[in-house]
Amino acid sequence: MQKQSKNNQFEKSNHRKNLFVVDPKIKVQLDQAVQCYVKDRYQEAVGILKKVLKLYPNYEDAIEVLGLSYYRLGEYEPAIDELEKFTNLTKNYEQLPVIADCYRALGFYKKMFSVWNLIKTKKLPRSIHGEARLVIAGAYKDLGDIDKAYELMKSCAGDSKEPSFLKLREWYVLADILEQMGDFPNSRRLFKKVLQFDPDLADVAERATI
């Protein structure tokens, strides 16, 4: 399973008001945990955040990073617990795609589709819808329904002179779907588009030349 992008996952939280004021020393610990997360030291981040949350159980920024750290460690059930708590506390829906991906990883497809349906009912940024769409397309592939995966992703084929990382991943997933459907010319075309902008994305360098 391809993990959701780490790009911009919580740096915007610096501009988000907390529900209460915390000790500045605790904020320093949160910053340390974030740095551990950024450097892929997820277990270390978890250790710091657990101590923070013993003092401030509803410190939403700490809850968010803890949930994301669990997610990166492949500990999906605690990741869901923390990220759902974060969502309920803040009414901020930006981590719903990650929650959906956790349910997908656990094979809880009914719950995953419930999250997807919630996302579709909300007026949320394209990035949230896009990340969730990648999760659901992957789930359809898991379930052997390649046609539904294609129907979900086919609108993502449009060109872009400066594609975002999300757009590149949409192209990659659509190219993979087309390859599975036997449409090799269009699959190679999309893989080559991804290669042009990000040659290090997954195995695109190999797949663009097959």
Image: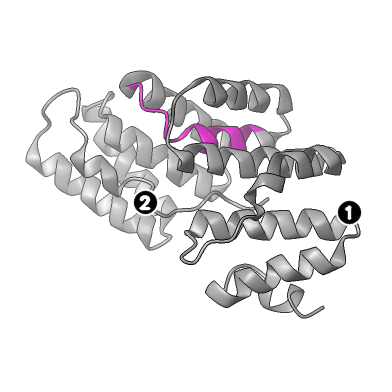
Q: Which residue is mark 1?
A: 181
Q: Quadrant of the C terminus?
A: bottom right
Q: Residue at x 72, y 28 (%)?
A: 109
Q: Is residue 199 visible?
A: no
Foreground residue among 83 and 53: 83
- The three-letter amino acid code for the residue at tag 1 is Met
Q: Secondary structure at mark 1?
A: loop
Q: Residue at x 73, y 78 (%)?
A: 206
- Most extreme residue toward the bottom, as rendered? 209
Foreground residue among 179 and 93: 179
Report crowding for label 1: few under 14, some 14 to 19, many 20 or more residues within 10 A (C-alpha): few
Scheme of colours in the image: one colour
Q: Magenta residues, as a range?
A: 91-103
Q: Residue at x 58, y 51 (%)?
A: 3
The image shows residue 184 at horizontal and vertical percentages of: 86, 66
**Magenta portion: prevailing SS class:** helix
Q: Which residue is mark 2?
A: 8
Report crowding for label 2: few under 14, some 14 to 19, many 20 or more residues within 10 A (C-alpha): few
Q: Judge whether residue 51 is colored magenta.
A: no
